[in-house]
């Protein structure tokens, strides 16, 4: 395992200054930074290979296709999918969820059916289901939160019924840091005959994920939160489900043949990839999963576990600071908080002046903020390259924020 | 520490002027900024085309609330005709700070409420 110092040296951006101070990047839940191997893989592709995939017979196109498909295989191995055919490239997690909502949902949901989600979802796992339920007449239901920011699993048996056709839930909350018992929730969905969709945007980058062990029917995640480039997401889907689903978007590459009277679809996974895909980005994500596998996802998780425990302890000592989500037990590397009497945007702006990047707002999870009766929070989120020293910087800067606002 | 948080801004945030409600206002307009969750309700009393009383209520970041406090102080006594010509620059002059594009929405929320409340102007093509 590389030392923390060696790891940080792989990320050129971590050397830069912001407002004359060393950058302290604590906005990893929004997007992660990118290591040299990812930047180099994309640059090499554009310098030496660039061509469209699945098209030409010329050398560059064959090489581009081979690299694009090799990236898909590496990503399949990274989450232990049974086959690379189960890995569909999308624009982001949001599009991956929308793909399931439209391709599967429009065909399968009827009035009287139910889709179950939770109160801790990101908007990207709420709004697509609201839209599809409006279109199909199905009913959307929610698993509520407990005051400490966990799911009310005691209510699961009453919420999951034979009417439930799909249970879509987040593996790790991007606000609360809560880690949900994914395998248990998938099993509960399957017991009533429902499919399970897991929003893995915050879990796949931060902990080992094995889709076959979890039993998930669908898993959605984003490249850019796991050291890869923006503009690319992944939908994992069980092969027999994907085989039976209708295409999401129509166009080039997703067809077997097109006649004016009608068309036939390409095989998996290309049936769901209309148009020229994000080729360089997929190759970049391939390099990113190699990099993460090199670190070891258990090591990534362990580093963040230690760091977030320290952050929760350290921030709890700041006067007037309230942490959202569980403060005891297992928790992901996200700490959202409020400072009494100070708006989160003011907190973030003052931290920025010290070179510290945190997010402020509702983090695309308004229902969580409504639950706690607040409009916004500030959020520090960690990755494997963050240090305990950076947590100290944050805590000290928050004390200075208090001082600025003290009357 | 930060050029945004000058003492005059913090003073208006801690001790907002004209915060509260008017008896029988002529104009009441509520607006919010979905980006940060800033909220403001602006209330005005108008006599002979002139603002005679102004108040605001709301919650939000220091920039939005200080901007509302300063703006209400400034518009009392002015004619609507004068105020109609107000732009982003007038608010930035009041605040006396440089503001980046993201926080500009916070700073301009009170002026937006004024323009929408008095003249129904909801789009300002050159302001944002």
Image: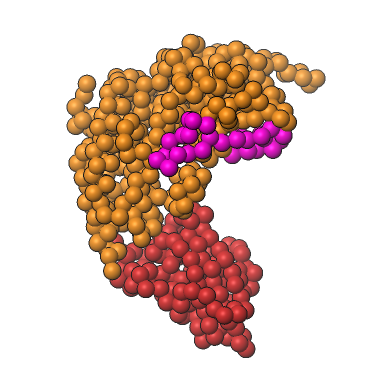
Please state which of residues A234 and A183 is positioned toward the viewer in this rendering.
A183
Residue plotted at (22% across, 47% down): A393
> Could you tell whether B103 is left or right of A87 in the image?
left
Q: A178 left or right of A126?
A: left
Residue, x 34% and y 33% (percent of image)?
A331
Range drawn in magenta: A127-155
- On the image, which quarter does residue A403 sit in? bottom left
Instruction: Find the residue positioned furthest to the right.
Output: A261
Image quarter of residue A335: top left
Q: In which quadrant is the N terminus of chain A drawn?
A: top left
Residue at point 46%, 80% (across, down): B74
The chain shown in orange is which? Answer: A
Residue A55 appears in view: no
* Chain B representation colour: red
Is residue A342 highlighted in magenta? no
Q: Residue at x 55, y 15 (%)?
A: A238
Where, quadrant-wise, is the C terminus of chain A in this rendering? bottom left
Q: Nearest the camera: A108 or A159?
A: A159
Q: Position of residue A217 (x, y in %)?
A: 54, 19
Residue A260 at least partly seen: yes
Q: Position of residue B68 (x, y in %)?
A: 46, 71
């Amino acid at each position: 395992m590389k030392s923390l110092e060696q790891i940080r040296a792989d990320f050129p951006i971590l050397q830069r200054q912001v407002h004359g101070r060393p950058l302290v990047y604590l906005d990893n839940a929004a997007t992660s930074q990118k290591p040299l191997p990812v930047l180099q893989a994309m640059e090499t592709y554009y310098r030496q290979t660039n061509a469209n995939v699945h098209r030409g017979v010329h050398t560059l196109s064959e090489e581009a296709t081979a690299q694009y498909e090799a990236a898909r295989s590496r990503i399949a191995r990274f989450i232990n999918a049974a086959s690379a055919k189960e890995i569909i490239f999308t624009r982001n997690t949001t599009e991956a969820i929308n793909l399931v909502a439209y391709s599967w949902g429009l065909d399968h949901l009827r009035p009287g059916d139910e889709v179950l989600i939770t109160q801790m979802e990101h908007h990207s796992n709420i709004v697509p289901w609201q839209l599809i339920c409006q279109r199909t007449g199905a009913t959307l239901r929610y698993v509520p939160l407990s005051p400490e920011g966990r799911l009310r699993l005691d209510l699961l048996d009453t919420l999951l019924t034979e009417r439930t056709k799909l249970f879509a839930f987040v593996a790790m909350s991007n606000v609360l840091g809560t880690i949900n018992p994914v395998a248990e929730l998938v099993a509960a969905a399957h017991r009533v005959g429902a499919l399970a969709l897991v929003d893995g945007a915050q879990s796949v980058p931060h902990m080992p994920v094995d889709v076959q062990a979890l039993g998930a029917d669908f898993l959605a995640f984003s490249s850019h939160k796991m050291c890869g480039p923006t503009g690319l997401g992944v939908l994992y889907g069980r092969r027999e489900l994907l085989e039976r689903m209708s295409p999401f978007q129509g166009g080039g590459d997703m067809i077997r043949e097109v006649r004016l009277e009608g068309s036939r679809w390409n095989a998996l996974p290309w049936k769901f990839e209309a148009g020229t895909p994000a080729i360089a980005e997929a190759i970049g994500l391939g390099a990113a999963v190699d990099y993460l596998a090199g670190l070891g996802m258990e090591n990534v998780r362990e580093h963040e576990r230690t760091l977030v425990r320290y952050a929760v302890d350290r921030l709890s000592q700041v006067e007037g600071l309230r942490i959202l989500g569980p403060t005891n037990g297992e928790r992901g590397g996200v700490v959202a908080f409020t400072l009494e009497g100070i708006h989160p945007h003011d907190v973030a702006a003052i931290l920025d002046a010290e070179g510290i990047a945190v997010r402020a707002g509702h983090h695309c999870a308004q229902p969580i903020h409504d639950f706690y009766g607040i409009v916004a929070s500030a959020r520090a989120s960690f990755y494997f390259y963050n240090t305990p020293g950076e947590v100290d910087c944050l805590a000290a800067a928050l004390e200075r924020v208090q001082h600025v606002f003290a009357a | 520490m930060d050029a945004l948080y000058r003492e005059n801004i913090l003073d208006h945030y801690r001790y907002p002027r004209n915060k509260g409600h008017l008896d029988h206002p002529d104009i009441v307009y509520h607006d919010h900024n979905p980006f940060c969750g800033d909220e403001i309700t602006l209330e005005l009393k108008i006599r002979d085309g002139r603002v005679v009383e102004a108040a605001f209520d709301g919650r939000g970041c220091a920039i939005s609330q200080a901007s509302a406090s300063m703006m209400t102080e400034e518009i009392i006594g002015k004619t609507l005709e004068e105020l109609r010509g107000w732009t982003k620059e007038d608010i930035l002059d009041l605040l006396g700070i440089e503001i980046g594009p993201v926080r500009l929405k916070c700073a301009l929320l009170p002026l937006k409420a004024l323009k929408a409340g008095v003249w129904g102007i909801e789009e300002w093509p050159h302001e944002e």
